[in-house]
Amino acid sequence: MEMVRLEGLSKTFAEGGRARVVLDCVNAGFTAGEFAVLLGKSGSGKSTLLNLISGIEQPTSGDVFVNGLAITRLRERERTLFRRDHIGFVFQFFNLIPTLTVLENVTLPQELAGHSGRAVNETALHLLERVGLAERRDAFPDRLSGGEQQRVAIARALTHDPLLVLADEPTGNLDEETGRRVLTLLLELTRAAGKTLIMATHNPEVVPLADRVLAIHEGQLREERR
Protein backbone atom coordinates (compact mmCIF):
# COMPACT_ATOMS: atom_id res chain seq x y z
CA MET A 1 0.00 0.00 0.00
CA GLU A 2 1.28 3.46 -0.92
CA MET A 3 1.47 5.87 1.99
CA VAL A 4 2.81 8.85 0.01
CA ARG A 5 2.39 9.60 -3.69
CA LEU A 6 3.94 12.56 -5.53
CA GLU A 7 2.41 13.40 -8.90
CA GLY A 8 3.97 16.02 -11.16
CA LEU A 9 5.29 17.85 -8.12
CA SER A 10 7.09 21.11 -8.88
CA LYS A 11 8.31 23.94 -6.70
CA THR A 12 9.79 27.21 -7.91
CA PHE A 13 11.07 30.07 -5.76
CA ALA A 14 11.60 33.68 -6.84
CA GLU A 15 15.11 34.87 -5.96
CA GLY A 16 16.38 38.29 -6.92
CA GLY A 17 13.89 38.65 -9.73
CA ARG A 18 14.72 35.22 -11.12
CA ALA A 19 12.93 31.90 -10.81
CA ARG A 20 14.81 29.03 -9.16
CA VAL A 21 13.36 25.60 -9.88
CA VAL A 22 13.90 23.36 -6.86
CA LEU A 23 11.67 20.46 -7.90
CA ASP A 24 10.67 19.84 -11.50
CA CYS A 25 7.68 17.56 -12.15
CA VAL A 26 8.65 14.89 -9.61
CA ASN A 27 6.77 11.58 -9.55
CA ALA A 28 7.42 9.05 -6.77
CA GLY A 29 5.74 6.78 -4.25
CA PHE A 30 6.56 5.59 -0.74
CA THR A 31 4.95 2.46 0.67
CA ALA A 32 3.56 1.92 4.16
CA GLY A 33 6.24 0.83 6.61
CA GLU A 34 9.09 1.87 4.31
CA PHE A 35 12.23 3.69 5.37
CA ALA A 36 13.34 5.98 2.55
CA VAL A 37 16.38 8.26 2.58
CA LEU A 38 16.64 11.51 0.61
CA LEU A 39 20.13 12.57 -0.37
CA GLY A 40 21.33 15.75 -2.02
CA LYS A 41 23.67 18.65 -1.48
CA SER A 42 22.65 21.65 0.62
CA GLY A 43 20.00 23.66 -1.18
CA SER A 44 19.04 20.78 -3.46
CA GLY A 45 15.47 20.67 -2.16
CA LYS A 46 15.44 17.93 0.49
CA SER A 47 13.80 20.07 3.17
CA THR A 48 11.47 21.60 0.61
CA LEU A 49 10.28 18.15 -0.41
CA LEU A 50 9.58 17.20 3.21
CA ASN A 51 7.69 20.47 3.68
CA LEU A 52 5.59 19.73 0.60
CA ILE A 53 4.83 16.19 1.75
CA SER A 54 3.68 17.54 5.13
CA GLY A 55 1.66 20.40 3.67
CA ILE A 56 3.77 23.09 5.34
CA GLU A 57 4.46 24.45 1.86
CA GLN A 58 2.32 24.31 -1.25
CA PRO A 59 3.77 23.25 -4.61
CA THR A 60 3.88 25.46 -7.67
CA SER A 61 2.12 22.59 -9.44
CA GLY A 62 1.35 18.94 -8.88
CA ASP A 63 -0.10 16.97 -5.99
CA VAL A 64 0.91 15.17 -2.83
CA PHE A 65 -1.24 12.27 -1.64
CA VAL A 66 -0.85 10.95 1.91
CA ASN A 67 -2.76 7.74 2.59
CA GLY A 68 -4.84 8.50 -0.49
CA LEU A 69 -5.75 12.06 0.48
CA ALA A 70 -4.61 14.90 -1.78
CA ILE A 71 -3.33 17.23 0.91
CA THR A 72 -2.33 19.81 -1.71
CA ARG A 73 -6.03 20.31 -2.45
CA LEU A 74 -6.95 21.04 1.15
CA ARG A 75 -7.42 24.50 2.58
CA GLU A 76 -4.63 25.76 4.85
CA ARG A 77 -6.46 24.99 8.10
CA GLU A 78 -7.36 21.50 6.86
CA ARG A 79 -3.70 20.86 6.00
CA THR A 80 -2.66 22.08 9.44
CA LEU A 81 -5.10 19.73 11.17
CA PHE A 82 -4.08 16.79 8.98
CA ARG A 83 -0.42 17.43 9.74
CA ARG A 84 -1.14 17.75 13.46
CA ASP A 85 -3.04 14.49 13.60
CA HIS A 86 -1.20 12.25 11.14
CA ILE A 87 2.41 13.36 10.68
CA GLY A 88 5.32 13.22 13.10
CA PHE A 89 8.42 15.40 12.72
CA VAL A 90 12.00 15.07 13.87
CA PHE A 91 14.04 18.21 13.17
CA GLN A 92 17.77 18.88 13.13
CA PHE A 93 17.50 21.51 15.87
CA PHE A 94 15.02 19.53 18.03
CA ASN A 95 12.36 22.32 18.18
CA LEU A 96 11.39 21.54 21.75
CA ILE A 97 9.39 24.14 23.67
CA PRO A 98 11.84 25.53 26.29
CA THR A 99 9.14 26.46 28.82
CA LEU A 100 7.65 22.95 28.85
CA THR A 101 9.06 19.94 30.67
CA VAL A 102 10.20 16.84 28.83
CA LEU A 103 6.87 15.12 29.53
CA GLU A 104 4.87 18.19 28.49
CA ASN A 105 6.81 18.41 25.22
CA VAL A 106 5.99 14.79 24.43
CA THR A 107 2.29 15.12 25.27
CA LEU A 108 1.95 18.39 23.34
CA PRO A 109 0.80 16.86 19.99
CA GLN A 110 -1.97 14.99 21.78
CA GLU A 111 -3.04 18.05 23.73
CA LEU A 112 -3.13 20.16 20.56
CA ALA A 113 -5.49 17.54 19.14
CA GLY A 114 -7.75 17.94 22.17
CA HIS A 115 -6.66 14.80 24.01
CA SER A 116 -5.52 14.76 27.61
CA GLY A 117 -5.67 12.65 30.74
CA ARG A 118 -4.07 9.50 32.09
CA ALA A 119 -3.93 7.61 28.77
CA VAL A 120 -2.02 10.44 27.08
CA ASN A 121 0.46 10.64 29.95
CA GLU A 122 0.91 6.87 29.99
CA THR A 123 1.65 6.80 26.26
CA ALA A 124 4.18 9.62 26.65
CA LEU A 125 5.86 7.97 29.63
CA HIS A 126 6.07 4.67 27.76
CA LEU A 127 7.83 6.41 24.87
CA LEU A 128 10.16 8.22 27.28
CA GLU A 129 11.04 4.85 28.78
CA ARG A 130 11.78 3.54 25.27
CA VAL A 131 14.15 6.44 24.62
CA GLY A 132 15.73 6.12 28.08
CA LEU A 133 14.50 9.41 29.52
CA ALA A 134 11.58 8.56 31.78
CA GLU A 135 13.60 9.74 34.79
CA ARG A 136 14.08 13.15 33.15
CA ARG A 137 10.36 13.72 32.53
CA ASP A 138 10.21 16.78 34.80
CA ALA A 139 13.37 18.39 33.42
CA PHE A 140 13.34 21.32 31.00
CA PRO A 141 15.06 21.02 27.59
CA ASP A 142 17.95 23.32 28.51
CA ARG A 143 19.01 20.80 31.14
CA LEU A 144 19.43 18.07 28.52
CA SER A 145 22.28 17.29 26.14
CA GLY A 146 21.74 17.52 22.39
CA GLY A 147 21.34 13.78 22.11
CA GLU A 148 18.81 13.72 24.94
CA GLN A 149 16.82 16.54 23.35
CA GLN A 150 16.70 14.64 20.07
CA ARG A 151 15.48 11.52 21.88
CA VAL A 152 12.68 13.60 23.39
CA ALA A 153 11.88 14.89 19.89
CA ILE A 154 11.63 11.30 18.63
CA ALA A 155 9.21 10.42 21.43
CA ARG A 156 7.16 13.52 20.63
CA ALA A 157 7.03 12.59 16.94
CA LEU A 158 5.51 9.20 17.75
CA THR A 159 3.21 10.00 20.66
CA HIS A 160 0.10 10.60 18.52
CA ASP A 161 0.60 7.41 16.46
CA PRO A 162 1.16 9.21 13.13
CA LEU A 163 0.72 7.66 9.70
CA LEU A 164 4.01 9.12 8.56
CA VAL A 165 7.25 10.28 10.20
CA LEU A 166 9.44 12.89 8.49
CA ALA A 167 12.98 13.49 9.70
CA ASP A 168 15.05 16.43 8.45
CA GLU A 169 18.76 15.92 9.19
CA PRO A 170 17.95 14.37 12.59
CA THR A 171 21.61 13.71 13.39
CA GLY A 172 23.01 16.85 11.76
CA ASN A 173 23.44 18.76 15.02
CA LEU A 174 24.97 15.88 16.96
CA ASP A 175 28.45 14.42 17.26
CA GLU A 176 29.12 11.20 15.37
CA GLU A 177 28.63 8.73 18.21
CA THR A 178 25.52 10.46 19.60
CA GLY A 179 24.11 10.71 16.09
CA ARG A 180 24.62 6.98 15.59
CA ARG A 181 22.74 6.15 18.79
CA VAL A 182 19.88 8.54 17.95
CA LEU A 183 19.60 7.11 14.44
CA THR A 184 19.48 3.54 15.75
CA LEU A 185 16.77 4.51 18.24
CA LEU A 186 14.68 6.31 15.62
CA LEU A 187 14.82 3.32 13.29
CA GLU A 188 14.01 0.83 16.05
CA LEU A 189 10.95 2.77 17.17
CA THR A 190 9.56 3.49 13.71
CA ARG A 191 10.20 -0.06 12.50
CA ALA A 192 8.55 -1.53 15.61
CA ALA A 193 5.48 0.63 15.02
CA GLY A 194 5.36 -0.09 11.28
CA LYS A 195 5.65 3.59 10.38
CA THR A 196 6.65 5.05 7.06
CA LEU A 197 9.83 7.08 7.64
CA ILE A 198 11.23 9.55 5.11
CA MET A 199 14.55 11.06 6.15
CA ALA A 200 16.60 13.81 4.56
CA THR A 201 20.23 13.45 5.53
CA HIS A 202 23.88 13.98 4.66
CA ASN A 203 24.91 11.07 6.88
CA PRO A 204 26.31 8.20 4.74
CA GLU A 205 25.84 5.75 7.62
CA VAL A 206 22.08 5.89 7.05
CA VAL A 207 22.26 4.59 3.48
CA PRO A 208 22.84 0.87 4.21
CA LEU A 209 19.95 0.86 6.69
CA ALA A 210 17.36 2.26 4.29
CA ASP A 211 14.86 0.31 2.19
CA ARG A 212 15.32 2.85 -0.60
CA VAL A 213 17.68 5.72 -1.28
CA LEU A 214 16.67 8.62 -3.51
CA ALA A 215 18.76 11.60 -4.57
CA ILE A 216 17.60 15.08 -5.53
CA HIS A 217 19.68 16.58 -8.32
CA GLU A 218 18.79 19.54 -10.51
CA GLY A 219 15.12 19.32 -9.59
CA GLN A 220 14.78 15.61 -10.21
CA LEU A 221 14.29 12.77 -7.73
CA ARG A 222 16.09 9.63 -8.77
CA GLU A 223 16.43 6.27 -7.05
CA GLU A 224 20.00 5.33 -6.26
CA ARG A 225 21.36 1.89 -7.00
CA ARG A 226 23.31 0.28 -4.16
Image: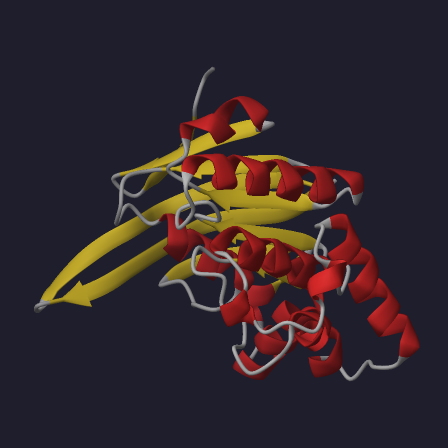
Quarter in which the N terminus is drawn: top right
Please name the residue shown 58% across and 76% down the image: 80
Residue 174 appearing in the image: yes
Which is nearer the eye, 48 or 103?
103
Q: Is residue 212 left or right of residue 185?
A: left
Q: Eyeballing the image, is 204 above or below 131?
A: above
Image quadrant of residue 82? Answer: bottom right
Q: Position of residue 133 (x, y in %)?
A: 70, 57
Image quadrant of residue 211? Answer: top right
Residue 33 appearing in the image: no
Q: Is residue 120 left or right of residue 93?
A: right
Q: Eyeballing the image, is 94 above or below 196?
A: below
Q: Eyeballing the image, is 225 above or below 185?
A: above
Please name the residue shown 72% across and 44% down the image: 189
Q: Is residue 105 left or right of residue 145?
A: right
The type of colouring in the image is secondary structure
Which is nearer the eye, 193 or 175?
175
Please name the residue shown 58% across and 26% down the image: 209
Please name the residue shown 33% across and 58% down the image: 11
Callout count: 0
Image quadrant of residue 137? Answer: bottom right
Q: Position of residue 190 (x, y in %)?
A: 71, 44
* Residue at the outermost top position: 226
Q: Position of residue 174 (x, y in %)?
A: 43, 47
Q: Position of residue 217 (x, y in %)?
A: 29, 36
Q: Is residue 173 left or right of residue 130?
A: left
